[in-house]
Amino acid sequence: MATCFWLRSCGARRLGSTFPGCRLHPRAGGLVPAPGPAPGPAQLRAYAGGLAGLSAALLRTDSFVGGRWLPAAATFPVQDPASGAVLGMVADCGVSEARAAVRAAYEAFCSWREVSAKERSSLLRKWYNLMIQNKDDLARIITAESGKPLKEAHGEILYSAFFLEWFSEEARRVYGDIIYTPAKDKRALVLKQPVGVAAVITPWNFPSAMITRKVGAALAAGCTVVVKPAEDTPFSALALAELASQAGIPPGVYNVIPCSRKNAKEVGEAICTDPLVSKISFTGSTTTGKILLHHAANSVKRVSMELGGLAPFIVFDSANVDQAVAGALASKFRNTGQTCVCSNRFLVQRGIHDAFVKAFAEAMKKNLHVGNGFEEGTTQGPLINEKAVEKVEKQVNDAVSKGATIVTGGKRHHLGKNFFEPTLLSNVTQDMLCTHEETFGPLAPVIKFDTEEEAIAIANATDVGLAGYFYSQDPAQIWRVAEQLEVGMVGVNEGLISSVECPFGGVKQSGLGREGSKYGIDEYLELKYVCYGGL
Ligand code: NAP
Protein backbone atom coordinates (compact mmCIF):
# COMPACT_ATOMS: atom_id res chain seq x y z
CA MET A 1 0.00 0.00 0.00
CA ALA A 2 1.30 3.44 -0.82
CA THR A 3 1.82 5.83 2.07
CA CYS A 4 1.01 9.49 2.33
CA PHE A 5 4.73 10.17 2.61
CA TRP A 6 4.78 10.00 -1.18
CA LEU A 7 2.77 13.17 -1.35
CA ARG A 8 5.55 15.17 0.20
CA SER A 9 8.23 13.63 -1.98
CA CYS A 10 6.16 14.16 -5.13
CA GLY A 11 5.43 17.80 -4.59
CA ALA A 12 1.72 17.29 -4.10
CA ARG A 13 1.69 20.11 -1.54
CA ARG A 14 1.01 22.27 -4.57
CA LEU A 15 -2.46 20.73 -4.63
CA GLY A 16 -3.85 23.60 -2.61
CA SER A 17 -3.18 25.99 -5.44
CA THR A 18 -4.36 23.57 -8.11
CA PHE A 19 -7.70 22.92 -6.42
CA PRO A 20 -8.35 25.86 -4.13
CA GLY A 21 -11.73 24.64 -3.00
CA CYS A 22 -10.73 21.19 -1.89
CA ARG A 23 -8.14 21.36 0.82
CA LEU A 24 -8.61 18.02 2.51
CA HIS A 25 -8.63 17.29 6.20
CA PRO A 26 -7.51 13.79 7.03
CA ARG A 27 -9.71 12.70 9.88
CA ALA A 28 -11.94 9.81 10.68
CA GLY A 29 -15.11 11.63 9.77
CA GLY A 30 -14.13 11.93 6.15
CA LEU A 31 -13.09 14.71 3.81
CA VAL A 32 -14.43 18.20 4.04
CA PRO A 33 -14.21 20.89 1.40
CA ALA A 34 -12.19 23.85 2.61
CA PRO A 35 -14.07 27.02 3.38
CA GLY A 36 -14.35 29.39 0.44
CA PRO A 37 -15.91 28.99 -2.96
CA ALA A 38 -17.99 25.83 -3.09
CA PRO A 39 -16.56 23.18 -5.38
CA GLY A 40 -19.81 23.07 -7.28
CA PRO A 41 -20.16 22.13 -10.93
CA ALA A 42 -19.07 24.61 -13.56
CA GLN A 43 -21.30 25.62 -16.43
CA LEU A 44 -21.38 23.37 -19.43
CA ARG A 45 -18.56 24.32 -21.73
CA ALA A 46 -18.67 24.22 -25.48
CA TYR A 47 -21.67 21.97 -25.52
CA ALA A 48 -22.71 21.76 -29.11
CA GLY A 49 -26.39 21.16 -28.67
CA GLY A 50 -26.59 17.39 -28.94
CA LEU A 51 -29.71 15.32 -28.97
CA ALA A 52 -32.91 16.67 -27.52
CA GLY A 53 -33.98 14.86 -24.41
CA LEU A 54 -30.58 14.37 -22.80
CA SER A 55 -30.38 15.72 -19.27
CA ALA A 56 -28.36 18.94 -19.26
CA ALA A 57 -27.73 18.46 -15.53
CA LEU A 58 -25.97 15.15 -16.14
CA LEU A 59 -24.33 15.94 -19.46
CA ARG A 60 -21.00 17.28 -18.21
CA THR A 61 -18.14 18.12 -20.56
CA ASP A 62 -15.27 19.08 -18.23
CA SER A 63 -12.97 16.75 -16.35
CA PHE A 64 -13.82 16.06 -12.72
CA VAL A 65 -10.78 16.33 -10.49
CA GLY A 66 -10.56 16.95 -6.77
CA GLY A 67 -14.31 17.53 -6.66
CA ARG A 68 -14.23 20.30 -9.27
CA TRP A 69 -15.23 20.51 -12.90
CA LEU A 70 -12.15 21.62 -14.80
CA PRO A 71 -11.74 22.46 -18.49
CA ALA A 72 -8.69 21.40 -20.49
CA ALA A 73 -6.77 23.41 -23.07
CA ALA A 74 -8.41 21.45 -25.89
CA THR A 75 -11.66 19.57 -26.47
CA PHE A 76 -12.66 16.59 -28.59
CA PRO A 77 -16.01 15.74 -30.19
CA VAL A 78 -18.20 12.87 -29.05
CA GLN A 79 -20.47 11.48 -31.75
CA ASP A 80 -23.75 9.64 -31.86
CA PRO A 81 -22.71 6.46 -33.72
CA ALA A 82 -26.18 6.11 -35.26
CA SER A 83 -26.24 9.47 -37.02
CA GLY A 84 -22.70 10.79 -36.77
CA ALA A 85 -24.05 13.95 -35.09
CA VAL A 86 -21.73 15.61 -32.60
CA LEU A 87 -23.25 15.28 -29.13
CA GLY A 88 -20.78 17.60 -27.46
CA MET A 89 -17.20 18.73 -27.09
CA VAL A 90 -15.44 17.25 -24.08
CA ALA A 91 -12.28 18.29 -22.21
CA ASP A 92 -9.29 16.62 -23.84
CA CYS A 93 -7.03 15.95 -20.86
CA GLY A 94 -3.31 15.48 -21.27
CA VAL A 95 -0.43 14.43 -19.09
CA SER A 96 -0.54 17.45 -16.77
CA GLU A 97 -4.25 16.97 -16.05
CA ALA A 98 -3.61 13.26 -15.51
CA ARG A 99 -0.86 13.95 -12.98
CA ALA A 100 -3.01 16.51 -11.17
CA ALA A 101 -5.84 13.98 -10.97
CA VAL A 102 -3.49 11.40 -9.47
CA ARG A 103 -2.31 13.90 -6.87
CA ALA A 104 -5.89 14.79 -5.99
CA ALA A 105 -6.74 11.09 -5.69
CA TYR A 106 -3.70 10.49 -3.54
CA GLU A 107 -4.42 13.32 -1.15
CA ALA A 108 -8.02 12.15 -0.88
CA PHE A 109 -6.81 8.59 -0.23
CA CYS A 110 -4.98 9.75 2.89
CA SER A 111 -8.36 10.62 4.38
CA TRP A 112 -10.71 8.22 2.61
CA ARG A 113 -8.87 5.17 3.92
CA GLU A 114 -9.57 6.44 7.46
CA VAL A 115 -13.29 6.85 6.85
CA SER A 116 -15.20 4.08 8.60
CA ALA A 117 -16.44 1.20 6.48
CA LYS A 118 -19.97 2.04 7.57
CA GLU A 119 -19.66 5.58 6.28
CA ARG A 120 -18.10 4.48 2.99
CA SER A 121 -20.93 2.01 2.68
CA SER A 122 -23.52 4.69 3.28
CA LEU A 123 -21.99 7.03 0.67
CA LEU A 124 -21.89 4.27 -1.94
CA ARG A 125 -25.51 3.53 -1.15
CA LYS A 126 -26.43 7.19 -1.69
CA TRP A 127 -24.63 7.11 -5.03
CA TYR A 128 -26.59 3.97 -5.94
CA ASN A 129 -29.88 5.62 -4.94
CA LEU A 130 -29.09 8.61 -7.15
CA MET A 131 -28.34 6.33 -10.09
CA ILE A 132 -31.71 4.66 -9.66
CA GLN A 133 -33.47 8.05 -9.36
CA ASN A 134 -31.77 9.18 -12.58
CA LYS A 135 -31.86 5.87 -14.41
CA ASP A 136 -33.87 7.08 -17.40
CA ASP A 137 -31.55 10.03 -18.06
CA LEU A 138 -28.45 7.87 -17.56
CA ALA A 139 -29.81 5.27 -20.00
CA ARG A 140 -30.46 7.93 -22.64
CA ILE A 141 -26.87 9.13 -22.33
CA ILE A 142 -25.61 5.58 -22.93
CA THR A 143 -27.79 5.20 -26.02
CA ALA A 144 -26.74 8.59 -27.36
CA GLU A 145 -23.01 7.99 -27.05
CA SER A 146 -22.75 4.24 -27.69
CA GLY A 147 -25.76 3.55 -29.94
CA LYS A 148 -26.95 0.76 -27.63
CA PRO A 149 -30.73 0.14 -27.84
CA LEU A 150 -32.48 2.06 -25.07
CA LYS A 151 -33.87 -1.10 -23.47
CA GLU A 152 -30.35 -2.51 -23.15
CA ALA A 153 -29.09 0.86 -21.88
CA HIS A 154 -31.69 0.68 -19.11
CA GLY A 155 -30.44 -2.81 -18.34
CA GLU A 156 -26.87 -1.54 -18.18
CA ILE A 157 -27.77 1.27 -15.79
CA LEU A 158 -29.39 -1.19 -13.39
CA TYR A 159 -26.43 -3.57 -13.70
CA SER A 160 -24.09 -0.61 -13.15
CA ALA A 161 -25.99 0.71 -10.13
CA PHE A 162 -26.17 -2.76 -8.60
CA PHE A 163 -22.35 -2.80 -8.36
CA LEU A 164 -22.52 0.29 -6.16
CA GLU A 165 -25.26 -1.32 -4.09
CA TRP A 166 -23.38 -4.62 -3.84
CA PHE A 167 -20.07 -3.04 -2.84
CA SER A 168 -21.79 -0.71 -0.38
CA GLU A 169 -22.78 -3.94 1.35
CA GLU A 170 -19.38 -5.61 0.91
CA ALA A 171 -17.58 -2.56 2.37
CA ARG A 172 -18.68 -3.65 5.84
CA ARG A 173 -17.62 -7.25 5.38
CA VAL A 174 -13.85 -6.98 5.09
CA TYR A 175 -12.44 -9.30 7.72
CA GLY A 176 -8.93 -10.14 8.88
CA ASP A 177 -7.57 -13.24 10.63
CA ILE A 178 -5.84 -14.30 13.82
CA ILE A 179 -3.34 -17.13 13.46
CA TYR A 180 -1.92 -19.21 16.31
CA THR A 181 1.75 -19.97 15.63
CA PRO A 182 3.87 -22.55 17.49
CA ALA A 183 5.38 -19.76 19.65
CA LYS A 184 3.37 -19.38 22.87
CA ASP A 185 4.30 -15.72 23.35
CA LYS A 186 3.19 -14.54 19.90
CA ARG A 187 0.00 -14.12 17.93
CA ALA A 188 -0.14 -13.46 14.22
CA LEU A 189 -2.72 -11.05 12.82
CA VAL A 190 -3.69 -10.57 9.21
CA LEU A 191 -5.07 -7.13 8.36
CA LYS A 192 -6.68 -6.11 5.08
CA GLN A 193 -5.82 -2.57 4.01
CA PRO A 194 -6.69 -0.54 0.92
CA VAL A 195 -4.14 -0.76 -1.87
CA GLY A 196 -4.07 3.00 -2.58
CA VAL A 197 -4.92 5.03 -5.67
CA ALA A 198 -6.28 2.98 -8.57
CA ALA A 199 -5.88 4.00 -12.22
CA VAL A 200 -9.07 2.83 -13.94
CA ILE A 201 -9.22 2.60 -17.74
CA THR A 202 -12.48 1.50 -19.33
CA PRO A 203 -13.98 0.71 -22.77
CA TRP A 204 -16.98 2.14 -24.64
CA ASN A 205 -19.16 -0.97 -24.82
CA PHE A 206 -20.41 -0.68 -21.21
CA PRO A 207 -19.75 3.00 -20.55
CA SER A 208 -21.25 2.91 -17.06
CA ALA A 209 -21.06 -0.64 -15.71
CA MET A 210 -17.37 -1.16 -16.48
CA ILE A 211 -16.70 1.85 -14.25
CA THR A 212 -18.87 0.99 -11.26
CA ARG A 213 -17.72 -2.66 -11.30
CA LYS A 214 -14.22 -1.36 -10.52
CA VAL A 215 -14.95 1.85 -8.66
CA GLY A 216 -17.57 0.32 -6.34
CA ALA A 217 -15.03 -2.24 -5.14
CA ALA A 218 -12.20 0.30 -4.93
CA LEU A 219 -14.15 2.85 -2.89
CA ALA A 220 -15.59 0.16 -0.62
CA ALA A 221 -12.05 -1.01 0.15
CA GLY A 222 -10.89 2.53 0.96
CA CYS A 223 -9.09 3.24 -2.32
CA THR A 224 -9.56 6.33 -4.48
CA VAL A 225 -9.63 6.34 -8.28
CA VAL A 226 -8.67 8.20 -11.43
CA VAL A 227 -10.92 7.06 -14.29
CA LYS A 228 -9.97 7.41 -17.94
CA PRO A 229 -13.08 6.53 -19.93
CA ALA A 230 -13.08 5.61 -23.62
CA GLU A 231 -12.97 8.46 -26.13
CA ASP A 232 -16.32 7.39 -27.60
CA THR A 233 -18.25 7.37 -24.30
CA PRO A 234 -17.02 9.90 -21.72
CA PHE A 235 -20.49 11.27 -20.89
CA SER A 236 -21.54 8.28 -18.79
CA ALA A 237 -18.36 8.52 -16.69
CA LEU A 238 -18.92 12.26 -16.19
CA ALA A 239 -22.60 11.77 -15.32
CA LEU A 240 -21.47 9.31 -12.65
CA ALA A 241 -19.16 12.04 -11.33
CA GLU A 242 -22.04 14.48 -11.06
CA LEU A 243 -24.03 11.94 -9.05
CA ALA A 244 -21.01 11.01 -6.91
CA SER A 245 -20.69 14.66 -6.03
CA GLN A 246 -24.40 14.92 -5.20
CA ALA A 247 -24.10 11.78 -3.07
CA GLY A 248 -21.39 13.41 -0.96
CA ILE A 249 -18.49 11.25 -2.13
CA PRO A 250 -15.61 13.47 -0.94
CA PRO A 251 -13.56 15.50 -3.43
CA GLY A 252 -10.70 13.56 -4.98
CA VAL A 253 -12.14 10.12 -4.27
CA TYR A 254 -13.66 9.72 -7.76
CA ASN A 255 -11.84 11.62 -10.52
CA VAL A 256 -12.53 11.47 -14.26
CA ILE A 257 -10.10 12.60 -16.94
CA PRO A 258 -11.63 12.17 -20.40
CA CYS A 259 -9.28 12.35 -23.35
CA SER A 260 -9.21 11.81 -27.08
CA ARG A 261 -7.79 8.66 -28.62
CA LYS A 262 -4.83 10.77 -29.70
CA ASN A 263 -3.95 11.36 -26.01
CA ALA A 264 -4.93 7.94 -24.65
CA LYS A 265 -1.43 6.44 -24.88
CA GLU A 266 0.34 9.21 -22.97
CA VAL A 267 -2.46 9.79 -20.47
CA GLY A 268 -2.60 6.03 -19.87
CA GLU A 269 1.14 5.91 -19.38
CA ALA A 270 1.06 8.92 -17.03
CA ILE A 271 -1.51 7.43 -14.68
CA CYS A 272 -0.19 3.87 -14.89
CA THR A 273 3.42 4.75 -14.14
CA ASP A 274 2.85 7.47 -11.51
CA PRO A 275 4.44 6.41 -8.20
CA LEU A 276 1.35 7.67 -6.35
CA VAL A 277 -0.74 5.01 -8.12
CA SER A 278 -0.68 1.54 -6.58
CA LYS A 279 -3.15 -0.32 -8.73
CA ILE A 280 -4.14 -0.51 -12.40
CA SER A 281 -7.59 -1.79 -13.26
CA PHE A 282 -8.30 -2.13 -16.97
CA THR A 283 -11.11 -3.40 -19.15
CA GLY A 284 -10.50 -3.46 -22.87
CA SER A 285 -8.60 -5.27 -25.55
CA THR A 286 -5.82 -7.76 -24.87
CA THR A 287 -3.48 -5.63 -26.99
CA THR A 288 -3.93 -2.56 -24.77
CA GLY A 289 -3.87 -4.74 -21.65
CA LYS A 290 -0.37 -5.92 -22.56
CA ILE A 291 0.84 -2.31 -22.87
CA LEU A 292 -0.54 -1.51 -19.43
CA LEU A 293 1.03 -4.66 -17.99
CA HIS A 294 4.40 -3.33 -19.15
CA HIS A 295 3.68 -0.08 -17.27
CA ALA A 296 2.72 -2.08 -14.19
CA ALA A 297 5.83 -4.24 -14.40
CA ASN A 298 8.17 -1.27 -14.43
CA SER A 299 6.76 0.10 -11.19
CA VAL A 300 5.48 -3.21 -9.72
CA LYS A 301 1.83 -2.26 -9.35
CA ARG A 302 -1.15 -4.49 -8.60
CA VAL A 303 -3.25 -5.17 -11.70
CA SER A 304 -6.72 -6.33 -12.67
CA MET A 305 -7.18 -7.02 -16.37
CA GLU A 306 -10.54 -7.76 -17.99
CA LEU A 307 -9.57 -8.40 -21.60
CA GLY A 308 -10.97 -9.79 -24.81
CA GLY A 309 -12.54 -13.18 -25.42
CA LEU A 310 -13.47 -15.59 -28.22
CA ALA A 311 -16.37 -17.38 -26.56
CA PRO A 312 -17.30 -20.80 -27.94
CA PHE A 313 -21.01 -21.68 -27.97
CA ILE A 314 -21.36 -25.47 -28.24
CA VAL A 315 -24.61 -27.24 -29.09
CA PHE A 316 -24.48 -30.99 -28.45
CA ASP A 317 -26.86 -33.49 -30.04
CA SER A 318 -28.83 -33.86 -26.79
CA ALA A 319 -29.56 -30.12 -26.55
CA ASN A 320 -33.02 -28.64 -26.62
CA VAL A 321 -32.98 -26.69 -29.90
CA ASP A 322 -35.38 -23.96 -28.76
CA GLN A 323 -33.38 -23.31 -25.59
CA ALA A 324 -30.13 -23.30 -27.55
CA VAL A 325 -31.49 -20.81 -30.09
CA ALA A 326 -32.75 -18.48 -27.33
CA GLY A 327 -29.34 -18.66 -25.66
CA ALA A 328 -27.55 -18.10 -28.96
CA LEU A 329 -29.59 -14.96 -29.68
CA ALA A 330 -28.97 -13.59 -26.19
CA SER A 331 -25.27 -14.35 -26.02
CA LYS A 332 -24.42 -13.32 -29.61
CA PHE A 333 -26.50 -10.27 -30.33
CA ARG A 334 -26.56 -8.32 -27.05
CA ASN A 335 -25.22 -4.83 -27.78
CA THR A 336 -25.09 -5.85 -31.48
CA GLY A 337 -22.39 -8.39 -30.68
CA GLN A 338 -20.20 -5.88 -28.90
CA THR A 339 -19.68 -7.48 -25.51
CA CYS A 340 -16.58 -9.29 -24.35
CA VAL A 341 -18.68 -12.36 -23.43
CA CYS A 342 -20.51 -12.49 -26.78
CA SER A 343 -20.35 -15.89 -28.44
CA ASN A 344 -17.77 -15.70 -31.20
CA ARG A 345 -17.82 -19.28 -32.52
CA PHE A 346 -20.81 -21.64 -32.73
CA LEU A 347 -19.82 -25.30 -32.63
CA VAL A 348 -22.79 -27.53 -33.48
CA GLN A 349 -22.82 -31.35 -33.43
CA ARG A 350 -23.67 -33.08 -36.70
CA GLY A 351 -26.96 -34.67 -35.52
CA ILE A 352 -28.56 -31.36 -34.47
CA HIS A 353 -26.71 -29.06 -36.88
CA ASP A 354 -29.31 -28.53 -39.59
CA ALA A 355 -32.23 -28.12 -37.18
CA PHE A 356 -30.26 -25.59 -35.10
CA VAL A 357 -29.09 -23.53 -38.08
CA LYS A 358 -32.61 -23.39 -39.54
CA ALA A 359 -34.21 -22.39 -36.21
CA PHE A 360 -31.44 -19.87 -35.45
CA ALA A 361 -31.86 -18.17 -38.84
CA GLU A 362 -35.64 -17.96 -38.38
CA ALA A 363 -35.26 -16.55 -34.86
CA MET A 364 -32.78 -13.95 -36.08
CA LYS A 365 -35.13 -12.76 -38.81
CA LYS A 366 -38.06 -12.63 -36.39
CA ASN A 367 -36.41 -11.09 -33.33
CA LEU A 368 -33.56 -8.87 -34.50
CA HIS A 369 -34.52 -5.38 -35.63
CA VAL A 370 -31.79 -3.02 -36.81
CA GLY A 371 -32.34 0.66 -36.08
CA ASN A 372 -31.52 3.74 -34.07
CA GLY A 373 -31.19 2.77 -30.41
CA PHE A 374 -33.80 5.36 -29.43
CA GLU A 375 -36.48 3.83 -31.68
CA GLU A 376 -39.07 1.56 -30.13
CA GLY A 377 -38.45 -2.06 -31.13
CA THR A 378 -34.78 -1.68 -32.07
CA THR A 379 -32.72 -4.61 -30.83
CA GLN A 380 -29.64 -4.02 -33.00
CA GLY A 381 -28.13 -0.55 -32.89
CA PRO A 382 -25.15 0.71 -34.87
CA LEU A 383 -21.63 -0.52 -34.24
CA ILE A 384 -19.45 1.94 -32.39
CA ASN A 385 -17.71 3.25 -35.53
CA GLU A 386 -17.00 2.42 -39.16
CA LYS A 387 -13.76 0.62 -38.28
CA ALA A 388 -15.85 -1.90 -36.34
CA VAL A 389 -18.10 -2.39 -39.39
CA GLU A 390 -15.05 -2.91 -41.59
CA LYS A 391 -13.82 -5.65 -39.26
CA VAL A 392 -17.10 -7.59 -39.48
CA GLU A 393 -17.22 -7.11 -43.25
CA LYS A 394 -13.65 -8.36 -43.59
CA GLN A 395 -14.42 -11.48 -41.53
CA VAL A 396 -17.53 -12.24 -43.62
CA ASN A 397 -15.67 -11.78 -46.91
CA ASP A 398 -12.77 -13.89 -45.70
CA ALA A 399 -15.10 -16.71 -44.59
CA VAL A 400 -17.11 -16.68 -47.84
CA SER A 401 -13.91 -16.69 -49.92
CA LYS A 402 -12.86 -19.85 -48.05
CA GLY A 403 -16.16 -21.70 -48.55
CA ALA A 404 -18.60 -20.45 -45.86
CA THR A 405 -22.28 -20.06 -46.75
CA ILE A 406 -24.29 -16.94 -45.87
CA VAL A 407 -27.53 -18.19 -44.28
CA THR A 408 -28.83 -14.72 -43.52
CA GLY A 409 -27.43 -11.15 -43.56
CA GLY A 410 -23.86 -10.80 -44.80
CA LYS A 411 -23.53 -7.13 -45.68
CA ARG A 412 -23.67 -3.53 -44.47
CA HIS A 413 -27.13 -2.29 -43.55
CA HIS A 414 -28.75 0.49 -45.58
CA LEU A 415 -29.40 2.58 -42.42
CA GLY A 416 -25.93 4.05 -42.40
CA LYS A 417 -22.19 3.53 -42.41
CA ASN A 418 -22.07 2.13 -38.84
CA PHE A 419 -24.81 -0.48 -39.32
CA PHE A 420 -24.33 -4.13 -40.32
CA GLU A 421 -26.91 -6.85 -40.91
CA PRO A 422 -27.18 -9.61 -38.29
CA THR A 423 -25.35 -12.41 -40.08
CA LEU A 424 -25.35 -16.20 -39.83
CA LEU A 425 -22.70 -18.25 -41.63
CA SER A 426 -22.60 -22.04 -41.98
CA ASN A 427 -19.89 -24.35 -43.36
CA VAL A 428 -17.34 -22.42 -41.35
CA THR A 429 -13.89 -23.92 -40.87
CA GLN A 430 -11.06 -23.15 -38.48
CA ASP A 431 -8.87 -21.51 -41.08
CA MET A 432 -11.31 -18.60 -41.29
CA LEU A 433 -10.55 -15.28 -39.54
CA CYS A 434 -13.87 -15.24 -37.65
CA THR A 435 -12.91 -18.37 -35.70
CA HIS A 436 -9.72 -16.98 -34.18
CA GLU A 437 -10.18 -13.19 -34.13
CA GLU A 438 -12.67 -11.50 -31.77
CA THR A 439 -15.47 -10.17 -34.02
CA PHE A 440 -17.19 -7.63 -31.75
CA GLY A 441 -20.10 -7.41 -34.14
CA PRO A 442 -23.30 -9.19 -35.27
CA LEU A 443 -21.73 -12.23 -36.94
CA ALA A 444 -22.52 -15.83 -35.92
CA PRO A 445 -20.28 -18.40 -37.66
CA VAL A 446 -21.26 -22.08 -37.32
CA ILE A 447 -18.70 -24.91 -37.35
CA LYS A 448 -19.97 -28.51 -37.58
CA PHE A 449 -18.33 -31.14 -35.32
CA ASP A 450 -18.72 -34.87 -34.62
CA THR A 451 -17.45 -35.71 -31.12
CA GLU A 452 -17.27 -34.09 -27.70
CA GLU A 453 -13.46 -34.35 -27.75
CA GLU A 454 -13.38 -32.52 -31.07
CA ALA A 455 -15.60 -29.71 -29.73
CA ILE A 456 -13.46 -29.25 -26.62
CA ALA A 457 -10.30 -29.21 -28.71
CA ILE A 458 -11.70 -26.53 -31.05
CA ALA A 459 -13.09 -24.48 -28.15
CA ASN A 460 -9.75 -24.50 -26.33
CA ALA A 461 -7.57 -23.89 -29.40
CA THR A 462 -7.07 -20.22 -28.60
CA ASP A 463 -4.87 -18.13 -26.32
CA VAL A 464 -7.85 -16.36 -24.70
CA GLY A 465 -10.53 -17.74 -22.37
CA LEU A 466 -13.20 -15.41 -21.02
CA ALA A 467 -16.66 -17.00 -21.37
CA GLY A 468 -17.91 -20.26 -22.89
CA TYR A 469 -21.40 -21.65 -23.37
CA PHE A 470 -22.78 -25.09 -24.13
CA TYR A 471 -26.15 -26.76 -24.45
CA SER A 472 -26.62 -30.39 -23.45
CA GLN A 473 -29.18 -32.49 -21.56
CA ASP A 474 -26.62 -35.12 -20.57
CA PRO A 475 -25.58 -34.61 -16.89
CA ALA A 476 -22.29 -36.46 -17.20
CA GLN A 477 -21.38 -34.52 -20.31
CA ILE A 478 -22.30 -31.26 -18.56
CA TRP A 479 -19.80 -31.94 -15.76
CA ARG A 480 -17.08 -33.05 -18.17
CA VAL A 481 -17.40 -30.11 -20.52
CA ALA A 482 -17.83 -27.45 -17.79
CA GLU A 483 -14.58 -28.64 -16.22
CA GLN A 484 -12.64 -28.92 -19.47
CA LEU A 485 -13.47 -25.58 -21.09
CA GLU A 486 -10.50 -23.26 -20.64
CA VAL A 487 -12.49 -20.14 -19.72
CA GLY A 488 -13.24 -18.11 -16.60
CA MET A 489 -17.05 -18.30 -16.91
CA VAL A 490 -19.32 -21.04 -18.26
CA GLY A 491 -22.98 -20.84 -19.26
CA VAL A 492 -24.63 -24.30 -19.19
CA ASN A 493 -27.93 -24.15 -21.04
CA GLU A 494 -27.79 -20.39 -20.44
CA GLY A 495 -26.70 -17.52 -22.66
CA LEU A 496 -26.73 -14.65 -20.13
CA ILE A 497 -24.28 -15.15 -17.28
CA SER A 498 -23.30 -11.73 -15.89
CA SER A 499 -24.49 -10.83 -12.42
CA VAL A 500 -23.00 -8.59 -9.73
CA GLU A 501 -23.06 -11.49 -7.26
CA CYS A 502 -20.86 -13.73 -9.45
CA PRO A 503 -17.13 -13.50 -10.21
CA PHE A 504 -16.44 -12.02 -13.64
CA GLY A 505 -13.09 -12.61 -15.34
CA GLY A 506 -11.05 -14.74 -17.67
CA VAL A 507 -8.11 -17.12 -17.93
CA LYS A 508 -5.19 -17.20 -20.40
CA GLN A 509 -4.86 -13.86 -22.21
CA SER A 510 -8.40 -12.84 -21.25
CA GLY A 511 -7.10 -11.32 -18.09
CA LEU A 512 -6.06 -11.37 -14.46
CA GLY A 513 -8.28 -11.12 -11.41
CA ARG A 514 -12.03 -11.14 -10.86
CA GLU A 515 -14.60 -8.35 -10.63
CA GLY A 516 -17.96 -8.28 -8.86
CA SER A 517 -18.98 -10.95 -6.32
CA LYS A 518 -17.48 -11.38 -2.86
CA TYR A 519 -14.05 -11.73 -4.52
CA GLY A 520 -14.05 -8.39 -6.33
CA ILE A 521 -13.10 -6.26 -3.32
CA ASP A 522 -9.93 -8.31 -2.74
CA GLU A 523 -8.47 -6.75 -5.90
CA TYR A 524 -8.25 -3.47 -3.95
CA LEU A 525 -6.98 -4.85 -0.63
CA GLU A 526 -3.50 -5.75 0.57
CA LEU A 527 -2.84 -8.35 3.24
CA LYS A 528 -0.64 -7.17 6.06
CA TYR A 529 0.77 -9.70 8.52
CA VAL A 530 1.39 -8.36 12.04
CA CYS A 531 3.41 -10.52 14.41
CA TYR A 532 2.32 -9.55 17.94
CA GLY A 533 5.00 -10.74 20.39
CA GLY A 534 5.84 -10.42 24.06
CA LEU A 535 2.58 -12.01 25.26
P1 NAP B 1 -9.27 -0.77 -26.19
O1 NAP B 1 -8.93 -0.21 -27.50
O2 NAP B 1 -8.26 -1.58 -25.49
O3 NAP B 1 -9.73 0.49 -25.30
C1 NAP B 1 -10.10 0.35 -23.95
C2 NAP B 1 -9.64 1.59 -23.19
O4 NAP B 1 -8.22 1.67 -23.23
C3 NAP B 1 -10.17 2.89 -23.78
O5 NAP B 1 -10.39 3.80 -22.73
C4 NAP B 1 -9.00 3.33 -24.64
O6 NAP B 1 -8.98 4.73 -24.90
C5 NAP B 1 -7.84 2.95 -23.74
N1 NAP B 1 -6.57 2.83 -24.42
C6 NAP B 1 -6.33 2.47 -25.70
N2 NAP B 1 -5.01 2.43 -25.93
C7 NAP B 1 -4.40 2.79 -24.76
C8 NAP B 1 -3.03 2.93 -24.34
N3 NAP B 1 -2.01 2.71 -25.17
N4 NAP B 1 -2.79 3.28 -23.07
C9 NAP B 1 -3.80 3.51 -22.21
N5 NAP B 1 -5.11 3.40 -22.54
C10 NAP B 1 -5.40 3.03 -23.80
O7 NAP B 1 -10.57 -1.67 -26.25
P2 NAP B 1 -11.93 -1.32 -26.99
O8 NAP B 1 -11.82 -1.67 -28.41
O9 NAP B 1 -12.36 0.05 -26.64
O10 NAP B 1 -12.93 -2.32 -26.24
C11 NAP B 1 -13.21 -3.56 -26.74
C12 NAP B 1 -12.36 -4.63 -26.08
O11 NAP B 1 -12.62 -4.64 -24.68
C13 NAP B 1 -12.71 -6.00 -26.58
O12 NAP B 1 -11.55 -6.75 -26.79
C14 NAP B 1 -13.51 -6.59 -25.43
O13 NAP B 1 -13.49 -7.99 -25.39
C15 NAP B 1 -12.87 -5.96 -24.25
N6 NAP B 1 -13.78 -5.94 -23.11
C16 NAP B 1 -13.50 -6.79 -22.09
C17 NAP B 1 -14.36 -6.84 -21.02
C18 NAP B 1 -14.08 -7.78 -19.88
O14 NAP B 1 -14.67 -7.60 -18.83
N7 NAP B 1 -13.23 -8.77 -20.04
C19 NAP B 1 -15.49 -6.02 -20.96
C20 NAP B 1 -15.73 -5.15 -22.03
C21 NAP B 1 -14.85 -5.12 -23.10
P3 NAP B 1 -9.64 5.27 -26.30
O15 NAP B 1 -11.08 4.98 -26.23
O16 NAP B 1 -9.35 6.72 -26.27
O17 NAP B 1 -8.95 4.54 -27.40
Image: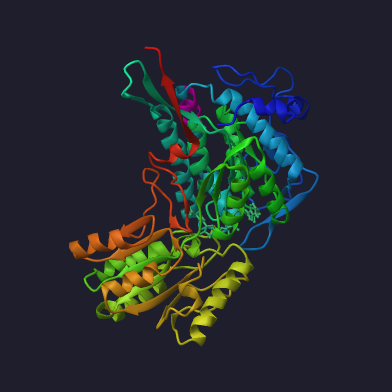
Residue at 72 percent across and 36 percent down: it is: 100
Point out the residue furthest to the right here: 73
- Classify the position of ligand 1 by quadrant: top left, top right, bottom left or bottom right: bottom right
Q: Nearer the viewer, residue 433 or 291?
A: 291
Residue 463 to residue 74: above or below: below
User: Is any part of residue 286 visible from this angle?
Assistant: yes
Q: Nearer the viewer, residue 184 or 523?
A: 184
Q: Quadrant of residue 73?
A: top right
Q: Is residue 392 left or right of residue 463?
A: right
Q: Nearer the viewer, residue 336 or 114?
A: 114
Color encoding of the figure:
rainbow
Residue at 76 percent across and 41 percent down: it is: 96
Is most of the magenta stretch helix, strand or loop? helix
Residue at 61 percent across and 71 percent down: it is: 416
Q: Nearer the viewer, residue 14 or 293?
A: 293
Q: Quadrant of residue 246?
A: top right
Residue 199 to residue 431: above or below: above
Queried whether the magenta region covers residue 161, the answer comes back as no
Residue 238 in the image: x percent, y percent?
63, 42
Residue at 59 percent across and 62 percent down: it is: 384
Residue 487 to residue 106: above or below: below
User: Is any part of residue 363 visible from this angle?
Assistant: no
Residue 419 in the image: x percent, y percent?
57, 69
Residue 231 in the image: x percent, y percent?
66, 53
Q: Is residue 398 left or right of residue 43?
A: left
Quarter of the image with the C terminus is top left
Point out the residue furthest to the left here: 475
Q: Is residue 441 left or right of residue 55?
A: left
Quarter of the image with the N terminus is top right
Q: Write the start and end of the magenta stretch as one range.
A: 119-126
Queried whether the magenta region covers residue 123, the answer comes back as yes
Residue 529 in the image: x percent, y percent?
44, 27
